[in-house]
Image (tube, rainbow, N blue to C red):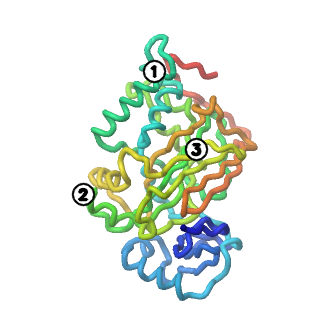
Amino acid sequence: MTRYDPATGLAEDTFGLARLDDGGRAFHALVRPDGSIVDLSSDHPDQDSLYGDWDRTFDELRRTAQRASSDGDLSGYRVLTPTVRPQIFCAGSNYRQHAAEMYTFNEGEYQKSRRAGESDEDFFARNLEFVTQRRAAGMPFIWLASHGSLIGPDDDIELPAVGVQHDWEAELTVVTTGAVPRYLDPDAAGDHIAGYTIGNDMHSAEMFSRSDIKWNADWIAKQQPTFKQAGPFVVPRQFFSDRRAMQIRLDVSGERMQDWPADDMIFSPEEYLAYASERVALLAGDLLMMGSPPGNGAVHGGRWLVPGDTVEISITGLGRQRHRVVAEDTAGRAPHYGRPPFDGPDTQE
């Protein structure tokens, strides 16, 4: 039976990679399960060096983990985002249960397809059938997030002055290698996964739908500062022969909101990387957030994040995050545009 060290949440005989801050210097470090670290800055001063030639680097890191002396303990450092200014690719509607819940319970544009008098149960069944048949028979869907929204695993989440339906989405997150070729086949794409980390793809639900544009959706609502959290570690893919052992859990102020197998996806990370390689250039240290399992705020009776909450996230073998939720300091300024217009069956205040 696999043992996970309580200091880090890492499994025995593995290691993680982290970006650490000692108060004046940011550097990459190898983190052992007991929390001891090895400073990698002399050999790997940046993420291109660390993730660029991944298979060679992994063999080197494994020897380092076994032989090198410790340069300190993780508790003496602030843990930063795992990579610097990554492209953040986000998988849309990639867990059947979550997608059907979102289409059923979220307000705004989602409710336009509800039939008159249709119950939640019947609407959910139709949405689940849509996800099962159309998504699985189609192709992955990706949207791109801004690295300006990215924070580390222990930083505060700042709720903005616009919107109140601030929601969570704990997600298994892929970290890419360097030299990812164009037009990957899914069977070869796994070689370009360096490792996995924890992500949270937050959004303000009522900010997403708008009816003054024909496509009825505004993806910038998912880009608020602090709304993408990642880390603490990048754990090499070589330690995960079977992703089915990974469980995603998210608690809000001590209450379990999400608890789902990480590998219960419509499209796999390998399929998503193949799809992405046909559309964009993938770079060393990019993040691919693989979509949310079920259990978002609308399903919990409209339980949204508010100042004073805490958000704790863990994924088996990848460690854990903990965030305070605070109100954004607007320096006395008020929003000019506010919430977008929406014409439809929308009940939000």
Q: Quadrant of the C terminus?
A: top right
- Badge 1 or badge 3: first in the primary sequence: 1
Judge from the rendering whether residue 104 lies leftward or rightward of residue 298; answer left or right.
Answer: left
Question: Which residue corresponds to the image point at 60% horizontal and 88% vertical from the top-left?
Answer: 69
Q: Secondary structure at mark 2?
A: loop
- Residue 328, disc: none
Mark 2, mark 1: which one is toward the viewer? 1
Q: Nearer the viewer, mark 3 or mark 2?
A: 3
Q: Position of residue 252 (x, y in %)?
A: 67, 44
Q: Is residue 203 visible?
A: yes
Residue 23 visible, this orientation? no
Say which mark, if any, is on residue 185. 2
List x then y, in percent, for residue 37. Answer: 61, 78
Q: Which residue is mark 1?
A: 122
Crowd band around label 1 with a 10 angstrom C-alpha radius: few (<14), some (14–19), many (20+):
few
Q: Amino acid at mark 2?
A: Asp
Q: Position of residue 260 (x, y in %)?
A: 52, 47
Q: 222 and 296: which one is in front?
A: 296
Q: Nearer the viewer, residue 96 or 19?
A: 96
Disc 1 to disc 3, C-alpha distance: 23 Å
Name the residue at the right extreme.
Answer: 308
Q: Amino acid at mark 1?
A: Asp
Quadrant containing the N terminus is bottom right
Q: Secondary structure at mark 3?
A: strand
**279 and 54: which one is in front?**
54
Q: Local crowd at mark 3 within 10 Å, few (<14), some, or many (≥20)?
A: many
Residue indicated by mark 3: 258
Q: Residue furthest front?
A: 1
